[in-house]
Image: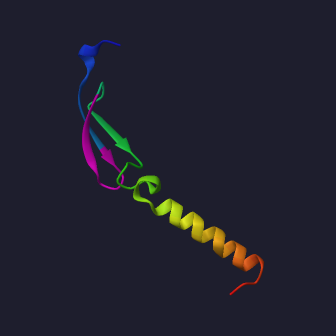
Amino acid sequence: MKNGNYMDTKVTCACGNTFTVKSNKPELHLEVCNKCHPFFTGEQGKAAKTGAVDKFNRKYGIK
């Protein structure tokens, strides 16, 4: 691929976030980005821990 084919590319996420990168396509559409992905928002770790604790408590009948 030649470097001359690169252009500014508008990237649009399903959450509505947009940003610009260099690519050989004029537009890109994403399902997740750093603004909505659980790893970057910090929501995944909390949900996984809470789910594991709840599962343990249900298994052993702890209220």
- Residue farthest bottom in this picture: 63
Location of residue 19 in the rendering, given as x and y in whole percent from the top left corner: 25, 43
Horizontal arrangement in the rendering, residue 48 relative to residue 11 (left or right): right
Q: Is residue 1 above or below residue 39?
A: above
Vertical comparison of 21 with 58: above or below: above
Q: Quadrant of residue 55?
A: bottom right
Report the label total: 0
Quarter of the image with the N terminus in it: top left
Q: Is residue 40 above or below residue 54?
A: above
Q: How is the image coloured?
A: rainbow
Q: Nearer the viewer, residue 53 or 18?
A: 53
33 magenta-colored? no
Q: Residue 30, position in %: x, y?
A: 38, 44
Q: Residue furthest right?
A: 60
Identify the residue at horizontal 44%, vertical 60% (top origin): 42
- Residue range (magenta): 12-22
Residue at (59, 66) in percent of width and height: 49
**Residue furthest out toward the left:** 8
Q: Position of residue 60 (x, y in %)?
A: 78, 79
The answer to whether residue 51 is left or right of residue 17 is right
Residue at the spot 70% in from the left edge and 78% down from the top edge: 57
Magenta segment, prevailing SS (helix, strand or loop): strand
Image side of residue 45 versus residue 42, left or right: right
Quadrant in the picture for the C terminus: bottom right
The image quadrant that residue 6 belongs to is top left
User: Residue 9, position in %: x, y?
Assistant: 25, 33
